[in-house]
Image (tube, helix red, strand yellow):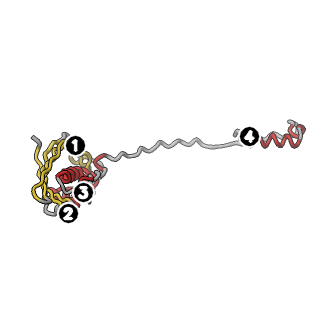
């Protein structure tokens, strides 16, 4: 091992104090170099960090949902649609339930499907939603209609061992028609109809 700069300075200082005779070859016994026995250790390969798919990241709640207005209805409809792939990818139905009216048939069917998927140990990937157009209108005080034109990306369902259960290879563009209400505290999705976009 190469001595450090500090070690070398101490050795020089010792020779200066003891005189040159004290640092001659005859008076210094050679110190054998230490034997270091070590077996070569393999450098572990870095473990790749798994990438979280986009659909497994909770969508951000739009600030416009705080409004009881057409803009608020549009934001609520879009946000609800973005929660769809997230619920399937994660099994997390918290926000989906918060926005769903208890009588909403479409909303309840998604809850049932996700719960069955989780119980079976299955998982889903894909179903990314790309919004092309959203339009809302006021029906009466606190009640709104909205349409969302969006394309749902390809998706796969896998079992607990990672084997393919089902898949949809082609994107689907649909028009979703919403009935929404705001009760003064929060938005509720009353019903959703889904039709292939013309």
What label sits on residue 130 in the rendered view?
Answer: 1
Quarter of the rendering occupied by the C terminus: top left
Kind of element beneath mark 2: loop
Residue 67, x across and y down, in percent: 22, 56
Measure how far apart labels 4 and 2 are at the Cα level: 83 Å
Measure how far apart labels 2 and 1 are at the Cα level: 30 Å
Q: Residue at x 73, y 43 (%)?
A: 6
Kind of element beneath mark 3: helix
Please name which of the two marks, 1 or 3, marks the residue nearer to the observer: 3
Residue 29, x across and y down, in percent: 83, 41
Residue lying furthest top: 25
| Residue 101, picture quadrant | bottom left
Kind of element beneath mark 4: loop
The answer to the question of whether label 1 and label 4 lie on touching residues, with beta carbons closer than 8 A, is no
Tell me which numbered mark, 1 or 4, is placed earlier along the sequence: 4
Measure how far apart labels 1 and 4 are at the Cα level: 70 Å
| Residue 37, picture quadrant | top right
Tell me which numbered mark, 4 or 2, is placed earlier along the sequence: 4
Tell me which numbered mark, 2 or 1, is placed earlier along the sequence: 1
Residue 22, x across and y down, in percent: 88, 40
Please name which of the two marks, 1 or 4, marks the residue nearer to the observer: 1
Q: Residue at x 21, y 51 (%)?
A: 75
Tell me which numbered mark, 2 or 3, is placed earlier along the sequence: 3
- Please give the residue where the numbered disc 4 appears in the rendered image: 33
What label sits on residue 66 in the rendered view?
Answer: 3
Measure how far apart labels 1 and 3 are at the Cα level: 23 Å
- Please give the residue where the numbered disc 2 appears in the rendered image: 184
Of residues 18 and 149, which is closer to you in this image?
149
């Amino acid at each position: 091992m190469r001595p450090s700069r500090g070690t070398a300075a101490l050795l020089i200082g010792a020779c200066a104090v003891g005189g040159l005779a004290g640092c001659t070859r005859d008076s210094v016994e050679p110190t054998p170099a230490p034997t270091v026995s070590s077996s070569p250790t393999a450098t572990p390969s870095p473990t790749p960090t798994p990438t979280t798919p986009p659909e497994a990241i909770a969508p951000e709640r739009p600030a416009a949902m705080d409004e009881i207005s057409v803009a608020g209805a549009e934001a609520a409809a879009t946000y609800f649609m973005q929660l769809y792939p997230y619920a399937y990818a994660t099994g997390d139905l918290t926000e989906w339930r918060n926005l769903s009216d208890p009588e909403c048939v479409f909303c309840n069917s998604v809850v049932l499907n996700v719960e069955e998927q989780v119980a079976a140990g299955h998982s889903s990937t894909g179903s990314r939603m790309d919004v092309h157009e959203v339009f809302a209108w006021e029906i009466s005080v606190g009640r709104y209609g909205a349409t969302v034109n969006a394309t749902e990306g390809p998706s796969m369902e896998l079992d607990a061992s990672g084997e393919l259960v089902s898949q949809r290879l082609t994107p689907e563009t649909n028009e979703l028609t919403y009935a929404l209400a705001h009760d003064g505290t929060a938005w509720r999705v009353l019903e959703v109809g889904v039709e292939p976009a013309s």
